[in-house]
Each structure stands twice: as structure tokens, then as C-alpha cells.
Amino acid sequence: MSRAGKNTLYRILLIGPALLAITIFMIVPLGLMAYISFRGRDYSGGVVWDQFTAEAYVRLFFERELDGTLALNFNYMAIILRSVWLSFLTMVISLAVGLPVAMFMATRDRKWKAVLVFMVTLPFWTNLLVRNYAWILLLRDHGTINSALLWLGIISEPLPLLHNAFAVAVGLTYSFLPFMVLPIYASLEKIDLKLVEASFDLYANRWQTIKRIILPLAYPGIVAGCVLVFVPALGAYITPELLGGGKTLMIGNLIGFQFGAARNWPFGAALGLFLLMLVLTSLWLYARRYRGEMERSP
Amino acid sequence: MRLNPFRSRAFPGDARHWPGLFTATAAFFAYVYLPILILIALSFNENRTVTIWTGFSLDWYRMAFSNRDIVSATTNSLIIASVASVSATTLATLAALRMASNDRFLGKTGINAVFALPITVPEIVPAVATLMFFASLGFTFGLGTVIIGHIVFCIPFAYLPIRARLEGMDPKIGEAAADLYANPVQAFWRVTLPQLVPGILSGLVLAFIISLDDFVTTFFLGGAGSTTLPIYIFGLVRTGVTPEVNAISSLMLLLSLSLVSLSLFLGRDQNRKTGPD
Amino acid sequence: MKTTNRAGLHSVKLLIASAVALSALGGSASAAGELNLYNWSNYFAPELLERYEKETGTKVNIDSFASEEDLLAKLQAGGGGYDVIFPGTTTLGVMVEKGMLAKIDVNQMENFKNLLPAFTTIAGDEDRAYSAPYMWGTTGFSYDPEMVPGGALEESWKEMFEPRDELKGKIAMLNEMSDVWNAAAFYTGVSKCTEDPAEAQKILDLLMAQKPHVKLYSNDGTIDRMIAGEVAVHMQWNGASHRVKEKKPNVVYVYPKEGTTFWTDVIAVPKDAPNLEEAKKFVNWMMSPEVAAIASNYTGYSNAVAGSGEFLKEDLRADPAVNTPEEYNDRLRAFENCSPASKDLREKVWTKLKS
């Protein structure tokens, strides 16, 4: 077989299985959802299959007045923007907290590395709901943290730690930290410590070493970690409800609500696809920029 | 380096001992484990609430063991998470091996996007659609359908760390190995795979914990006999969560700890046989 | 470099091995003479399960769901494999209308005569051809007398929707669209099935004005929250309020005078139930007084079977939250199936409240 033919064969054998799994069990269903988003809404839930309408997409931005005219409505956009902002915040905090940990892990002995990888994920063998309850207990007015601070005399009134944006950020970051730490660790692990030490001879400055040696090495891991934190955080809804107080919907609740109590499947599908487009577009823009940079640099 | 990694003397250029790195990591683990300690403590609580401590008792462990719904839900969770994470990691590793190479081919960026697809939409959308798809094919719902669903959304969690690991890895190593070993399969097992292990391990544990905590996909794709721990726990909304749930969570931690210790113990044996590094 | 990560590699192998072992274990389920129930978690007495198994030789399995709307969506999308399901009033009507349930003629069953008269009919299944009642409850609110001024509150939704200054920020609502909408409709005197946008606006205004004083909206952990004293007043299901009293006996459950939602969880059989005959037997069995009482004793909610009272635990009988005093009967408002236009309005109000 020719070299090129062999290459293609390997490509199919290696990439094929995963691609096939995602195509059959993800792309086909999403195609079905795209179809549903253009069908009529059955008010009892489900879909009116023989009716074509773009009503679901109109609803994203407009609401119908009594007389049937359309008026602009930013309720849904506000929910989407808030979710994006919160996920972004979660991602940034996770990165700030996770990077040093990943560096620490990557520079240990190999016996310690395995132990640390498991230590990072061990807490997540417990259930999300009880983890959130534990946070409630820590953060509430008469909770562990406030009691400790009061007892130490640092504060005289309990701090409002629960049911606000702070609590949501703490809780979401907590849930997604391993997804930031481990990919960065995996890409940093190949770091050659001699390289770092050599860089000291050249630059003699820690910050320079981080910027010129460590960050470029960690870069693929940082990208992977950011995707794994940002995107799933968009869909989170248990933590925002329990720690944030459920006063505002997240995009995850909003979509779930359409398939549940609101019984508006086409709109749920349209919201899901809108979000999909949003995420894919930003990933694509990012990939294009990244490739551009790669080509410019020697 | 045989010294305790946390204690050795630092010299200015030594990246292992940068000041702050250890402190940051210690703070991180305090943050991660503080709620877990509280969760464990409450599994020994004598009253039925999960947020108020009144006294010590082992009742909730006894009750969790005799509650057959909890026991079967836990077993289901472990089966699903193990099978799904291992399968997804295998598929992801194969794909990443090819995708991380430097050659360009048609649709590479597109395929990368496809691998991220399962996490780009809130779960409920693909979950309902997959359910409709399976129903139209006449599938019987149960552990099998749930596992298929989990494998699909676990793929990105395994794929991204593995690809991150592979990216920028020196392709010459693979080529050199191919020269050394006549057989490409041998070259893969002896050289490429050991190099990849940190990525695979990261991907595997991430896939495992994401599967273990899943609610939506499991709920929709499940059938008779496939209730998992998260579904059981969320279903408690009518009657309230009790420390039974904390007890079973603590037992899961214990299980995880013993698996890890066992693997380290066996690993140590193997290292001794192969000699020092 | 070659020897790195042996330990890691080993743990990978170990995980693979344990996965294979575990999946072998799981493959041994499914046998003849099984009955698969689908219910909320901890909402069915294990004692009953064992009893039924002993009496009939049928193995009973229980699976859990967490919201009846999700259950409806799952069945509509074609999911299932269950013999007996336990939906609520909000979704029962749709299930009947869409032909998702088997017509099991509950009204012809031997034990149907045991039902309390009020439960021989239900919105969505008026002649009880498809469903038998399981548990019923109310959605009112609970308060802790030690945390409210004067130690008592009026029996009115006013205390929640237009709270006194002392209670502002100490109120928790359920995060359930229909419960919140209904309560607000009762308080404003608007029909809960209203199709008039101006009336819906009145409800929205009330809820928006209340929102700053609400500490949180949540269905989870209502019991703990009351016991811990995180809030003074909590919109709550009566069975949950009963559980609060186990720890705080002074807590009061209020049936607001403007109207209190009264809901029923029912027992029904999906159209494609694998074991239809056994399922029918089971439904009939559930309507016998002693069985119903055991179910109530376990869940902490009332049942609809006459004569079950004598088997009830004393604390259930003595608790007005569970055993609704007769003078409150005229405050209870049953479920009504509202028009699509009305449902659309409530959904808009809910989204605006939460955006």
C-alpha cells in the first residue's frame, strides 16, 4: 500500500470509532432537535410534527402582544448573557487557582503525581447535591465560617456569604476545578525541569520563566481546561439554585424548563441550538486566531 | 530524587520549590476537602437532617446498607461510570493519537469541533433527542442505553486532556521507536503509550467523575432497573435528603481510596521488579 | 523517561479490570414475574414492597424520578419500560388525553369502594378509568413561631407576599412555577386559569414586589432550612412540614384562607407496561386500608382510603398539617386543567420573574 493510503487507513481506524459514536448518538439527535425547533408546539408537551413554523426563533427576541404584533423582548438574552458571564468568571477563577496546583503536581516525583491526580478528583466521588449542602452549611449566616470568624472576633455580624453571586462563584469553581487542573497537569507533566533551571541562567527571573517556558508548554492544557470548565458551567443549574437562591434562571434551567413545566419543546430545541451555535462560533474564531498565530511564529 | 518532595531544600532555580506553589496547593486542597470533611462528619449525625449536627450515630450507615434502592443505585452508578469512562477514554485515545499529529488533512478542524460537541449544548437537548431516536429504533431502555449516552458525553472529557498531552510532544520519539522496534504495535505499547499515561489517566478520571454525577442523560435514557445514585438523590425532593446519602457518599470515598491504594501498592511491586529508574 | 508513570499505567489497567468485573455483575438482572415501579425516591414503604413480594411471589423493583414534568417528557419522547408509575395531578390529564396510559378500569376494581368520596373522581380522569389515588397533600406555608413577631402569623398568603418588615429576607419560596402561580392567583383573587394579560400582570407585579424579600426559591432542602432556622417562613408541602415538626414541634403549618393548592399523586399504568395484569392487581392492592396506612406512615402524607385511619401512626393523626382539620376543607383548591393561552401567560410571568 502506498504511504498516503496507509496514512488514510490509520486515520480512519483511529479517529473512526469515536467519530462514529458521536455522529450516531450526538449529531443525529441534534439534527432531530434542529428539525423539532422548526415544528409546531404541542401545548401538552411534545411536537406538532406536520406544522412548520419559525415561531421558536422569533420568541428568542420578540414577544407577541395581545393583538398579535411583535415587541422586542430581551428576557431570554438577559438569561443567556448572565450565564455566559458567570461561566466566564468560573473559568477565570478556576484557571487562577488551578494553574499553580497543576505546576506543583507536574514537578513532583512520579509516585506523588499519581496520588495527587486522585486527590484532585476524590471529592467528586460524592454526589453534587450533598456537596452543595456541605457548602450551605459552611456559608450560611450561622454556618461554620461565620461562626469561626465571630468566635475569633474578626467580625461582629455574620457576613452574607450565601444566596448571592459570591456563593455561586465559589460553588461553581469548586465543581469544575478538576476539569481545569488535570488537563493543564497533563500537558505540563512533560516539562523538563532542566529546561526551567536553564532558563534561570538565561533570564534569572521567575516571572520570565513562567511566561517563556511554562505557559507555552501548558498552553494546550489551558485551552482544554478552559473549554471543559466554561462550556459545562454554562449548563449548570443545581449550584446556582442552591447556593445562589434560585432568583434568576440560568440557561441550563431555562432550557430544562421548556422540556418540563413550560412544555415548549420547539423553543427548548431552538434555545439549545442557539447556544450550540454561540459556542461553536467562539471555538471556531479562537481556532482560527490560534492557527494564525502559529503560522506567523517561526 | 528520593527525598520527601514537600521538604527538600530549595535553591533559587529549582522549579520544584518555588515559594507560593506549595502554599497555593495547600490552600487548594483545603478548599477542596473542607466541604468533604463536613459531609463525612454529617454521615455520623444522629438526626435526619444533613445540615445540623446533634450527636454521633452509625444508624445512617446501617440504614444505607439495608436500603435496597440505595444499594442498587450505587451499584448501577459504579457500573455505568466504569464502563462509560473506560470506553470513552479508549475511543478518545485512539482519536487523539491521530488528531494531535502535525499533518493537515481535510476536515481536521471540523472533527475537532465534533469531539467537543457533546458538551456544547445543555444536556437535556441531546438527552431528549437521543431518547426519541432510541425509541424509534425500538431499543429496550436500561443500563445499556444509559451507558451509550454516557460514553458519548464522556468523550470530550477524555479527549481534550489526552490531546493536550500529545500536542507539542516530539514526534521524533515515535519515529525513533519505530526504528528500534520492528513492530509498530510494540513501538506503541512500549514508547507512545507510557508517554501518554498522564493524559490518559487525567481523561479517565475526569470521564469517570462526570459520569458518576450525571443526572439528565441518565434519567431520560434509563429504563426499569437503571436508577443511579444521582437520580435517587434528586428524587428525594418529596421527602427530604437524609444523612443516608452522606453515608453512601462517604463509602464511595472509601472505595475510591482503597482502589487507589491498591493500585499504588501493586504498582510499587512492579517497579521493584523492573528495578530503579 | 521510559519508566515514568508505571504506577499511573497500572491504575489504568486496574480500572479497566474492575469495570469489566462490575459489568459482569450487573448483567444478571431481569427475571419473569417482575413488577417495575416508577416513583419519587423514599416515597414507597420498603415494608409494603416485601409484603407484596411475599403475598404474590412477584419481584418488585423501584426506580426514581425527581419531577413529574420530567416524567411526562420522558414518556412523551418514548422512554419507559415501567409497569406502574406515580405521576401527579399536573400531568395526569395530559397522559390520559394523549393515550399514554392503559385503561385499567380502576372504578371496577374490588377495592375501589374503599376510596373516600372526594377521590372517586379527579381532574383529567373523571371516572377513574386510568388512575387510583396514592398520596395527597397541600401546598401552604410553615413558620417558626420563635422567629416571627408576636409568635403567630395570620392564616393568609399576605404574610408571604407582602411580608412584615421583621420577616423581610427571612422568607423562602418553592421553586415550582405552578405552586407559586397558584398561590399568587389566590391572593390577588385572580382565577388561576386566567387568560387576561392584565390579570397576569397583577400576579407578576405581586411576585416582583415580593422578590427582594425572598431569601431563596428552592424545592430542595426545605426541611433542613426550617430546622436550621435559616428562614422564618417557608412555602412548603405539608408532608415536609410534618418532618420539620419531628425536630421543631412548635412549627405551624398554615392553610392560607385565600386558597391552598391541593394535589394528588396517583397510581397509573403506562400503555406499554410489560406486565399489565400484575400491574392491575397491584393497583387494586394499594387501595386496601392497611396498605394505604403503611404507605402514609412511611411517606408522611395522607392517603385517600377510608378506614386507613386506625392503622395510622399517632403523630400523623395528631398533626393538623397532615390530617387536615375539617374547617379548612373549603380552603383547598383542586387542580384545574387550564387553557394553552393561560399556561402561556403563567410561563411568561415565571420567565420574567426569573430573568
Image (cartoon, helix red, strand yellow):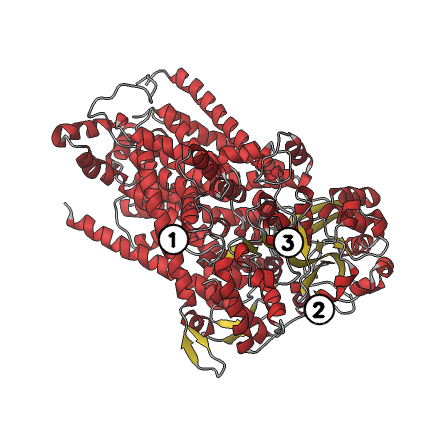
Q: Is residue C77 visible?
A: no
Q: Residues within 10 Å of mark 3 (few under 14, many from 20)?
A: many
- Report the amino acid beneath label 3: Ser
Tell me where residue B21 sits by quadrant.
top left
Q: Is residue C292 visible?
A: yes
* Left or right, residue A203 beside residue B166: left
Q: Is residue A98 above or below residue C75?
A: above
- Residue A187 % position (x, y): 31, 37
Q: Residues within 10 Å of mark 1 (few under 14, many from 20)?
A: many
Residue pictured at 44% horizontal, 18% vertical: B269
- Residue A149 % position (x, y): 43, 36
Residue position marked by numbered label 3 in the rendering: C142
Q: Residue furthest front?
A: C150
Q: Are marks 2 and 3 on the same chain?
A: yes
* Left or right, residue C90 beside residue C283: left
Q: Is residue A260 above or below residue B96?
A: below
Tell me where residue C258 sits by quadrant.
bottom right
Comparing A249 with C171, the one in front is C171
- Mark 1 → mark 3, Cα distance in angstroms: 33 Å
Kind of element beneath mark 3: strand
The first of marks 2 and 3 along the sequence is 2
User: How many marks on residues?
Assistant: 3
- Report the amino acid beneath label 1: Leu
Residue position marked by numbered label 2 in the rendering: C124
Residue position marked by numbered label 1 in the rendering: A86
